[in-house]
Amino acid sequence: MKKKTLGMMISSLRKENGMTQQDLADRMGVTDKAVSKWERDLSCPDVNSLPKLAEIFEVSVDELMQVKQEAETRKDYTPFIKLVLRGVALAMGVSVTVLSILNELEVGSALGMLGIGLAALSATAFLPEDEK
């Protein structure tokens, strides 16, 4: 989602609420020219008036200013985790194969390595699907 300017947010919220620039100006105690300048990003409302503006539009100041919540800004590492787990599974399989060919691997060790690979591969099933 593309972030809007404060002016775009004010304009959008004003229209959603069926208000004219004059209606908003009257409620804010400013002129309609001031509201027009806000919406065109030529000026901004006073910081102290933001709570009143948010109240008029029935949104929080954070929503008005488009402050993202921490959970929304957290990166999704799921694809990377899946890649690493699949890499571990592949590495274990290749290692067992190569070491077996070279007769450098005991059966117990081979089963342990294959178990680790299988566990890593099956763990990817519990991760959310990639969104396309």
Image: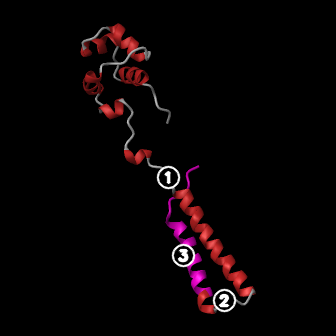
Residue nearest the observer in this picture, 9 or 37: 37
Image quadrant in which you'd find residue 67: top left
By what rule are the colours in the image chosen? Answer: secondary structure
Amino acid carrying label 2: it is Leu
Q: Nearer the viewer, mark 1 or mark 2?
A: 2
Residue 100: give x, y in percent of width and height: 71, 87
Magenta run includes residue 126 = yes
Residue 44 within the magenta-colored segment of the rendering: no
Q: Amino acid at mark 3?
A: Ala
Query: x, y (%) of residue 81?
Result: 54, 61
Q: To which quarter of the image does residue 41 belong?
A: top left
Q: Main secondary structure of the magenta part?
A: helix
Q: Give the residue drawn at x 42%, y 45%.
A: 72
How crowded pointer 3 is (Cα within 10 Å; few <14, some 14-19, many 20+) is rated as some
Image spot of residue 18 (x, y percent)? 35, 19
How many angstroms separate mark 1 from mark 2 (CA)? 38 Å
Is residue 102 positioned above or below 61 on the image? below
Q: Which residue is mark 2?
A: 105
Question: Which one is earlier in the sequence, the residue at label 1 or at label 2?
Answer: 1
Q: Is residue 114 above or below residue 74?
A: below
Decide: few, some or many residues near mark 2? Use Cα within 10 Å; few <14, some 14-19, many ≥20.
some
Q: Which amino acid, mark 1? A: Asp
Residue sitting at the far right: 101
Q: Is residue 129 at all visible to an observer of this figure?
A: no
The residue that mark 3 highlights is: 119
